[in-house]
Amino acid sequence: MAGSPERWQKIGWGGISFRLPPDWHPTLIFDSYLFFEQQGQPAFAIKWQRIQGHFSPERILKKLHQSLKPAGHLIEKWELPQNIKELLPAHSMTGFQWQENHKGCCGILLYCPDCRQATLLQLYGTERTGSRTFENILASFADHADDGDQLWSMYDIKASLPVQARLTSHEFLVGRFTLTFDYKGTALTLYRFKPAAAILSGQTLSDFGGPLAESAPCTMHGTNKATWSRTVGGAKKLMTMLQRKPAWIRLQLWQIPEKNVILGVKGAGKRPLGEEIITSIAKSFTAL
């Protein structure tokens, strides 16, 4: 196992959070499905959904069995160790396993009666039990927030947003990460740009951020921080809305030289959301 669990990477996505070994890298990222590899080989997958009506673990595992059947894999019951069951006493747990070319895959189906969410976790290429790895993962697992904020942490970025913020799009490209959320009708966007030194070569942070601000004026700029803000009212607001442009924009960008990264938070919508929400998100937004 790579390092102690205390040093594992923290993953937060779509309302769930947990820790994984630092050398497990996400290769598939969807709204409610994540897949991780280790040195190019499958390592871990997690999928979750809100259950409407009666929860039936048998029905969910039957669907999984049908998806594996064409490849000749048969799902068997895995009797979960007591120490794993005790980690999440409020959840129901169902263990399962299957074999492929002498490589084991074991999994756990979780269900939380409080938030009515079912979560399917699978470990690939492990020994048949995989109990120690699952013990460490589940010790850090949460499927709903208790404090009104929700963790979003992937690759080298981490931020906390209100639980009402709904992810609408995301891109993890070389040099640029973008996550956009809908929050009460306003678009909230997180930006991460790297390497900052190369990006800012020959231009200032305010020069770089101008196109992102959508014609909003720069109201504050310094060596490592810049802010843009615009609120349109009256007849101009109507014209702006007819042109399908935001009547309110606030953008904050800041450079972290020691991380060689530029981070940013932007709000854009029909009405002012309040700069305090942008400031709060910006304070939580960090590069790891």
Image (cartoon, grey):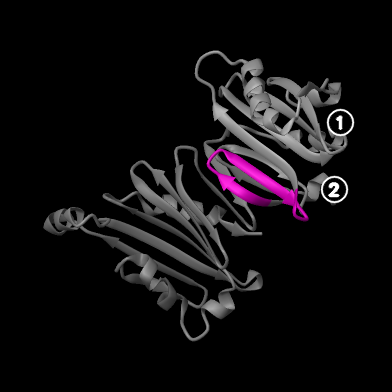
Residue 196: image quadrant is bottom right
Q: Does residue 86 appear in the picture of this structure?
A: no
The 10 Å Cα crowd at callout 1, few under 14, some 14 to 19, many 20 or more, is many
What secondary structure is found at the residue carrying circle 2?
loop
Check disc 2 and report the residue beneath it: 4
**In the image, which residues are magenta?**
26-41
Q: Residue furthest top?
A: 54
**Is 22 contained in the magenta span?**
no
Q: Are marks 1 and 2 in contact (CB under 8 Å)?
A: no
Query: In screen coordinates, is 2 left or right of 170?
Result: right
Q: How many marks?
A: 2
Check disc 1 and report the residue beneath it: 129
Q: Does residue 226 appear in the picture of this structure?
A: yes
Depth check, front residue: 15 or 42: 42
Image height of 237 relative to 224, above or below:
above
Q: Residue 77: horizontal and vertical position, in percent?
A: 79, 20
For the point 86% across and 31% down, the residue is 129
**Is 29 contained in the magenta span?**
yes
For the point 88% across and 36% down, the residue is 127
* Mark 1 vs mark 2, CA separation in Å: 20 Å
Secondary structure that dominates the magenta span: strand
- Location of the C terminus (image quadrant): bottom right
Residue 195: image quadrant is bottom right
Q: Residue 159: horizontal and vertical position, in percent?
A: 56, 51
Q: Residue 175: horizontal and vertical position, in percent?
A: 56, 68
Numbered badge on residue 14: none
Q: Closer to the observer: label 1 or label 2?
A: 1
Q: Earlier in the sequence, mark 1 or mark 2?
A: 2
Image height of 158 relative to 132, above or below:
below
Which amino acid, by three-letter code, is at mark 1?
Thr
Which amino acid, by three-letter code, is at mark 2?
Ser
Depth check, front residue: 85 or 44: 44
